[in-house]
Amino acid sequence: MSESAVSKRYAAALFDIALESKLVDEIEEELTVIRKIFIDHKELNAVLSHPKVPTEKKKQVLKGAFGSVSTAVLHTLYLLVDRARTKIIPELADEYVKMANRSRQTEDAIVYSVKPLSEEEIASFSEVFAKKAGAASLRVRNEVNPDLIGGVKIRIGNRIFDGSVSGKLARIERQLAGENRKKG
């Protein structure tokens, strides 16, 4: 079974537990932090996946690093150690977030802009683009990118809405290049 399928199964099982115990948001926050730690600190996964480190020692490392997380998350981490699958933790977290968003009819979006956006502007983007994304709401994160020159670029899942000046210039450039090829 592929790692993607495995991470989806673990995420689904954890999500079911979270739904039953009404901890969907709390567990999502915990997994988001854990995901970031595993991505930023590759040595943690190296220790947890090393065959010469005893399983109990690995669990002690997890307890020390993540002892304050919910029991469901900690036991999931222990289970992944027992089954030598700790490398799927970041993907499991991503899958869990997707499931939580689906259950809330929410999507995550990134709005790239030249300068930081106000809360009102973010709320406006959320309202307008939620409808385009077919979601009840968007959780919008603003990232500043001066390369845009002006305007904004919005990423919702794998869709991009590019209203930036740099994006418009690139489209004009492609259009002109296409016309020159037709003439040549």
Image (tube, helix red, strand yellow):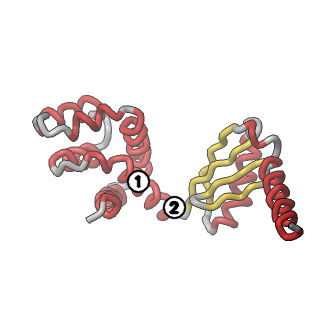
- Taking depth in this image into account, of 34 and 184 the one nearest to the observer is 184
Question: Measuring 39% from the left and 35% from the top, which residue is drawn there?
Answer: 37
Please indicate whether residue 15 sits to the left or right of residue 46 in the image: right
Residue 143, position in %: x, y? 66, 40
Q: Name which residue type carries label 2.
A: Arg
Q: Quadrant of the N terminus?
A: bottom left
Q: CA distance from mark 1 to mark 2?
A: 10 Å
- Taking depth in this image into account, of 166 and 94 the one nearest to the observer is 166
Residue identifier under label 2: 104
Residue 126, position in %: x, y? 69, 54
Q: Quadrant of residue 95?
A: bottom left
Question: Measuring 76% from the left and 46% from the top, which residue is drawn there?
Answer: 121
Q: Quadrant of residue 33?
A: top left
- Taking depth in this image into account, of 61 and 177 the one nearest to the observer is 177
Which comes sooner in the sequence, label 1 or label 2?
1
Secondary structure of the residue carrying tag 1 is helix
Residue identifier under label 1: 24
